Image: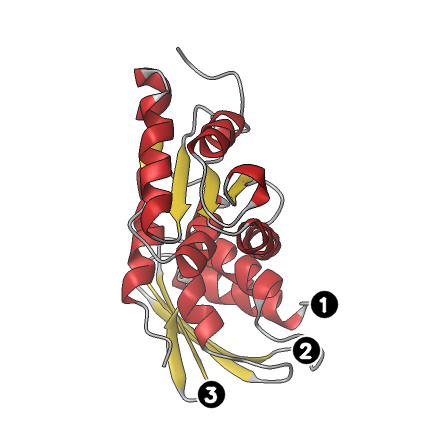
């Protein structure tokens, strides 16, 4: 089933063990990417502990869901497991609109956010996130 | 195929960070030409936000914007205009 959400721009879901990391990064990405790109966070575990929570990720994926699609970025190890558990709860149509980017969280989210703000496709936004792996800092 | 380039200065109060850098890359991405920016002895792909942020261009820095491709002249003109009017 098609989604009724969205403004034509690919959205981002940021998953971190820390709600503060996810929230701070969302602020930073919004500043660089502008107001058109939906950025939804899933930070922290159950009871606001440090960790990740499949239920919280599922809620974020559903909030972000749009026809343009969603790129998901994660921080460490078990974030990925939580995302996989959440995606397993989605319908095939919903899951087909999600791409999990193999990218560093901060750089990947910035790159993906800016490219998403140009109206790029889901695959192009995910590729921008993954290109962040090869950009050197020094 | 054409080439074009221009030297511009950032306003003294605006570094090429966050919001201005995003705006630069969004504008650059709307052209088909290849776009490069040089500043501080570094070079960046004008369509890569991470490379543009990596220039570390502070307020007042001089940028060389170069483009190569069919819409190169228009790209350089629009980006130069954007940079000099950042606020």
Q: Secondary structure at mark 2?
A: loop
What subunit carries mark 1? B
Which residue was labeled with disc 2? B11
Quadrant location of the N terminus of chain A? Answer: top left
The answer to which of marks 2 and 1 sits earlier in the sequence is: 2
Q: In the rendering, at what x and y percent does residue B64 appear?
A: 46, 80
Q: In the rendering, at what x and y percent does residue A116 appear?
A: 45, 44
Please indicate whether residue B59 sits to the left or right of residue A57 in the image.
right
Which residue was labeled with disc 1? B87
Q: Secondary structure at mark 3?
A: loop
Which residue was labeled with disc 3? B40
What subunit carries mark 2? B
Q: Is residue A64 visible?
A: yes
Q: Is residue A125 visible?
A: no
Above or below residue A138? Residue A56 is above
Q: Secondary structure at mark 1?
A: loop
What subunit carries mark 3? B
Above or below residue B38? Residue A9 is above
Q: Which mark is residue A9?
A: none
Please indicate whether residue B59 sits to the left or right of residue A99 in the image.
right
- Same subunit, labels 2 and 3: the answer reads yes
Question: Residue sitting at 54 percent across and 39 percent down?
Answer: A40
Please indicate whether residue A79 sits to the left or right of residue A55 in the image.
left
Question: Residue sitting at 57 percent across and 72 percent down?
Answer: B16
> Do the CB atoms of the residues marked 2 and 1 lie less than 8 Å apart?
yes
Q: In the rendering, at what x and y percent does residue A86 appear?
A: 38, 28
> Do the CB atoms of the residues marked 3 and 1 lie less than 8 Å apart?
no
Q: CA distance from mark 2 to mark 1?
A: 7 Å
């Amino acid at each position: 089933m098609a989604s009724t959400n969205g403004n034509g721009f690919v959205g981002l879901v940021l998953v971190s063990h820390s709600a503060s990391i996810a929230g701070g990064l969302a602020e930073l990405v919004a500043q660089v990417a502008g107001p058109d790109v939906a950025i939804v966070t899933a930070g922290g575990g159950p009871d606001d502990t440090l960790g990740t929570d499949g239920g919280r990720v599922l809620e974020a994926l559903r909030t972000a869901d749009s026809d343009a699609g969603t790129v998901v970025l994660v921080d460490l190890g078990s974030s990925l497991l939580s995302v996989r558990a959440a995606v397993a709860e989605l319908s095939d149509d919903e899951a087909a609109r999600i791409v999990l980017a193999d990218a560093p969280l901060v750089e990947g989210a910035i790159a993906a956010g800016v490219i998403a703000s140009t109206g790029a496709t889901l695959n192009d936004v995910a590729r921008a996130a993954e290109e962040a792996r090869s950009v050197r800092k020094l | 195929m054409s080439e074009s380039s221009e030297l511009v200065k950032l306003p003294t109060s605006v570094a090429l960070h966050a919001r201005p850098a995003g705006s630069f890359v969004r504008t650059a991405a709307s052209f088909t030409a290849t776009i490069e920016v040089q500043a501080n002895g570094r070079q960046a792909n004008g369509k890569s936000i991470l490379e543009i942020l990596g220039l570390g261009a502070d307020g007042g820095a001089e940028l060389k914007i170069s483009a190569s491709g069919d819409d190169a002249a228009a790209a350089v003109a629009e980006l130069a205009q954007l940079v000099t009017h950042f606020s």
